Image: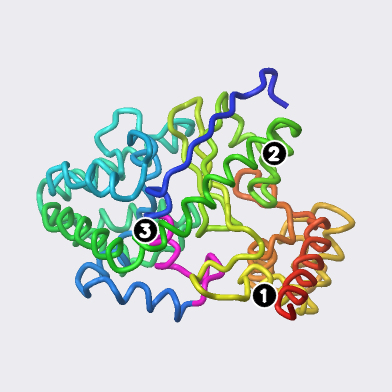
Amino acid sequence: MMAKTPVIGWEYGTAYELFVSLFVLTQPDQFGIRPAYAASVRSRIPAAERKLVEDILPVFGLPLKWIHELPAPRDAISALWALKQIPPAERMIKLQHLEDSDAYPGKTPEEIEKHSKIKEILLRVAAEGKWTTEDRNFIHQLLGKLDKGVKKEALARCLDWWSRPEELGEACLSALQAYYQSFFEEEEKRLEPILKESVQRAQERAAVLNLDELFLELSQGVKLDDAFRVEKFVFAPAYWQTPLILYERLNANTMLVLYGARPADMSVMPGEIVPEGLVRALKALADPTRLKILNFLAQEELAPSELARRLKLRAPTVTHHMNELRLAGLVNVLVEGSEKKYTARMESVDTIHKNLKDFINASSE
């Protein structure tokens, strides 16, 4: 444990959800969302701008620090207005904080050097309007080490966009505006009271739990390790990513953590009666291999490599099962460097049973 108890701060804003929901919709499998539904929402964005979103977001991620620095109330329309005030050629540079001298707080000297090189490449590509194979290969190699799983073809499309910064900035704003008008404006009304209630409930839990317990509960299964040991945490709720977390260091001493705020009895899809979380949990428990894994993890903490050895399965197969169990909220995970270790989250089994009974009874009524 840390010698000094970290400070905890709270915030919420639908600007986070504007970007998070679109991020989730571009890679629905990673977040347990039906691909057909995600594609139907993305199809409301004009084709050219939709292609931009699908190319850029999965590779470069979310501008969490930029959103955090927006003035309250950090709602979606304020974020769009703030983005519009940035000259088009500078928009993506601002969103990615590439102009910051201290853009990578909390990283090792080696990591800082590599990320600084990527920043240098992107700024040069934007300035010169071209990129090289060496540029693409260097970025691809680093993203591979970060477990991003980005293909070279996808990265080439991103660099093509970066080589046209003004067009990129205009298309980025246009895509977000189209998404807001065609979908998120109504979605925001549904989500705002949920986010407010989530913050209030989390603050109440913070009054009775220590930081490790609070982090485990809000993250629905992530244990604090050294990478998360900072002097201050800022927690913000996000509906669409549930049960996963998103995080970014704001500076060397402060970590922003977006935790899942979707209630167990609600669906990510507006109007859907059956909660995806319940369906995913039941599917996870219906697989015999995953039941064996939970049996092992109920006894001791294990890494996927050890599970693969015991089950006589290939490592990618075990990784797939672990992702399904994590999305179902059935495991706790501790990240130690490049390795993850898991234990069974037994309280989730009771919760799933209760949620199933509640749903069946509510439906029959």
Where disc 1 sits, the SS reads: helix
From the viewer's perspective, is residue 334 above or below residue 268?
A: above
From the viewer's perspective, is residue 282 above or below residue 60?
A: below
- The answer to whether marks 3 and 1 mark residues whose Cβ atoms lie closer than 8 Å is no
Question: Residue at point 57% right, 68% down?
Answer: 267
Q: What mark, if any, has residue 279 been given in the picture?
A: 1
Q: Earlier in the sequence, mark 3 or mark 1?
A: 3
Q: Earlier in the sequence, mark 2 or mark 3?
A: 3
Q: Main secondary structure of the magenta part?
A: helix
Q: Quadrant of residue 320?
A: bottom right
Q: What mark, if any, has residue 214 been given in the picture?
A: 2
Where disc 3 sits, the SS reads: helix
From the viewer's perspective, is residue 195 above or below residue 103?
A: below
Question: Residue at point 70% right, 44% down?
Answer: 216
Q: CA distance from mark 2 to mark 3?
A: 30 Å
Residue 24 within the segment the image draws in magenta: yes
Q: Which residue in the structure is indicated by mark 3? A: 59
- Could you classify mark 3 by the number of other residues whose Cα lies within 10 Å: few (under 14), some (14-19), or many (20 or more)? some
Q: Earlier in the sequence, mark 2 or mark 1?
A: 2
Q: Quadrant of residue 202?
A: top right
- Could you classify mark 1 by the number of other residues whose Cα lies within 10 Å: few (under 14), some (14-19), or many (20 or more)? few
Q: What mark, if any, has residue 313 been given in the picture?
A: none
- Quadrant in the picture for the C terminus: bottom right
Residue 282 within the segment the image draws in magenta: no
* Picture coordinates of residue 200, whole percent (x, y): 60, 39
Query: Magenta residues?
Result: 20-34
